[in-house]
Amino acid sequence: MIPSGLFWERRFRRPRQGWPAFFDTAVDGIVVINERCQVLAFNKACEDLFGYKASELLGDNVNKIMPMDYATAHDGYVQRYLDTGQKRIIGIGREVSGRHKDGTEFPVELSVGEAPTPDGRQFIGILRDLRPRHSVEQRLAQAQAQLVHMTRISAMDEMGAAIAHELNQPLTAILLYLQAVSRKAKADDALDAQLLSVIEKAVAEAERAGENHSADA
């Protein structure tokens, strides 16, 4: 008895010989199915992408390379199209999920075309692995977030410098006024000692504020 995969490989070998030479050298995955969703062809890029050899899938339902939640509904989608002619994905590229032989699910870009043949309609799916693109997009998003963060920090530094500049002149003026009052108060023997102490403390605080402000600037 011929194993199932070998049977289908022999069954569809002749049509495959008439396909373009790039079929097995294409960078993107190419899978061909019939109206019953059976895999007729599975190129080398698809083998690398999904982990199956073509001989493991030929004649089997293509839903083996789909996530379970989509795989169970796929045959119905195809049948609805055959019954109504209403296109939902044919001719329109979209992002879907694929399932590797080991069960890993990953994003792929899928474009589907249709071709009439003497054996009925066939559907050609072109699949591109989106993981590299998603990885680049994620790194770009992280870089943009870091740039925004650094821009905000820079803006805060500039604002702090502007505020410091605005405060510098009033602080200097206050200090000069207090120092003048302190000198005059010390020269006046009749001034209350407690009031003189308050003035001296005010001068000291103004000097400290000015020193802190200069250090922050």
Image (cartoon, helix red, strand yellow):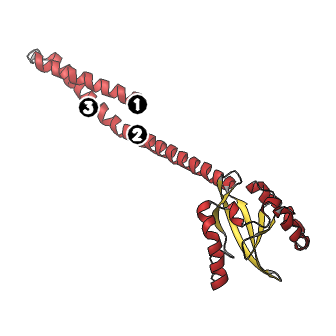
Estimate the x, y position of residue 117 in percent, counting from the top left: 82, 81
- Residue at image coords 86%, 66%: 7
Figure disc tally: 3
Residue 192 in which image quadrant: top left
Estimate the x, y position of residue 191 in percent, counting from the top left: 10, 18
Q: Mark 3 highlights which residue?
A: 174
Quarter of the image with the C terminus is top left
Q: Mark 2 highlights which residue?
A: 160
Distance, label 1 to label 3, CA atoms, is 19 Å
Q: Secondary structure at mark 3?
A: helix
Q: Residues within 10 Å of mark 1 (few under 14, many from 20)?
A: few
Q: Residues within 10 Å of mark 2 (few under 14, many from 20)?
A: some
Q: Secondary structure at mark 1?
A: helix
Q: Amino acid at mark 1?
A: Asp
User: Vertical placement of 141 versus 54: above or below?
Assistant: above
Q: Secondary structure at mark 2?
A: helix
User: Front-most of 79 and 156?
Assistant: 79
Q: Mark 1 highlights which residue?
A: 216
Distance, label 2 to label 3, CA atoms, is 21 Å
Quarter of the image with the N terminus is bottom right
> Which marked residue is nearer to the observer: mark 2 or mark 3?
2
- Residue at image coords 62%, 82%: 86
Asked whether the beta carbons under mark 1 and mark 3 sit within 8 Å of each other, the answer is no
> Which marked residue is nearer to the observer: mark 1 or mark 3?
1
Q: Amino acid at mark 3?
A: Ile
Estimate the x, y position of residue 53 in percent, counting from the top left: 81, 57
Estimate the x, y position of residue 3 in percent, counting from the top left: 84, 61
- Residue at image coords 33%, 28%: 210
Q: Amino acid at mark 2?
A: Gly
Residue 39 in which image quadrant: bottom right
Is 164 placed left or right of 137 in the picture? left
Residue 68, numbered label = none
